[in-house]
Image (tube, rainbow, N blue to C red):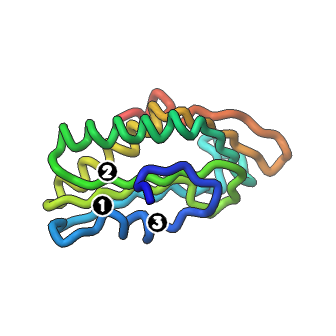
Amino acid sequence: MSRLRILADPIDPAQVEASVRGAAHGATACFTGIVRELADDGRSVSGLSYEAHAEMAVAEFERIAAEAIQYFGTCEIAVAHRVGNLAVGDVAVAVAVGAVHRSTALDACRYAIDQLKARAPIWKREMYADGSSAWRDNCPPDRQA
């Protein structure tokens, strides 16, 4: 099973993290993105809907993982991103990195999620409690790393 995936089924962050554990790794770092109840503008959110070009997204995950290894050192990276309709509290994305040392794991994990949000062909629609919805940027310019 690939460690870099687009999924229609729920994500188990523990499985994503377990996929990068190894006897050579002294550290794992994980990021889990969860659907929250309030939008950035304060509106109540009833859920999110994600669409992706899966093949292109996984290819971008591969490039991001290769860059993280180049920048931070040897590590193993796993990414799982949901598509479809998600409810408040559902896991939308999980990134895990296993490495010899914590600094590599933490730095590579942060890099991977930041780059994924900025570059992967994944689109997010917020659905609001009032019945309206809006397509949202994955990585608003004021929050880019």
Callout 1 touching callout 2 (CB < 8 Å)? yes
Residue that extends furthest to the front in the rendered view of this protein: 1
Determine which residue is flagged by label 3. Answer: 13
Q: CA distance from mark 1 to mark 2?
A: 6 Å
Residue name at image x 43 percent, y 39 percent: 116
The picture quadrant where one finds residue 21 is: bottom left
Determine which residue is flagged by label 1. Answer: 29
Q: Nearer the viewer, residue 16 or 43?
A: 16
* 2 or 3: tag closer to the N-terminus: 3
* 1 or 3: tag closer to the N-terminus: 3
Identify the secondary structure beneath mark 3. Answer: helix
Residue that extends furthest to the top in the rendered view of this protein: 141
Residue name at image x 38 percent, y 55 percent: 78
Q: Is residue 5 left or right of residue 74?
A: right
Q: Nearer the viewer, residue 98 or 34?
A: 98
The location of residue 66, given as percent across then percent down, is: 27, 39
* 1 or 2: tag closer to the N-terminus: 1
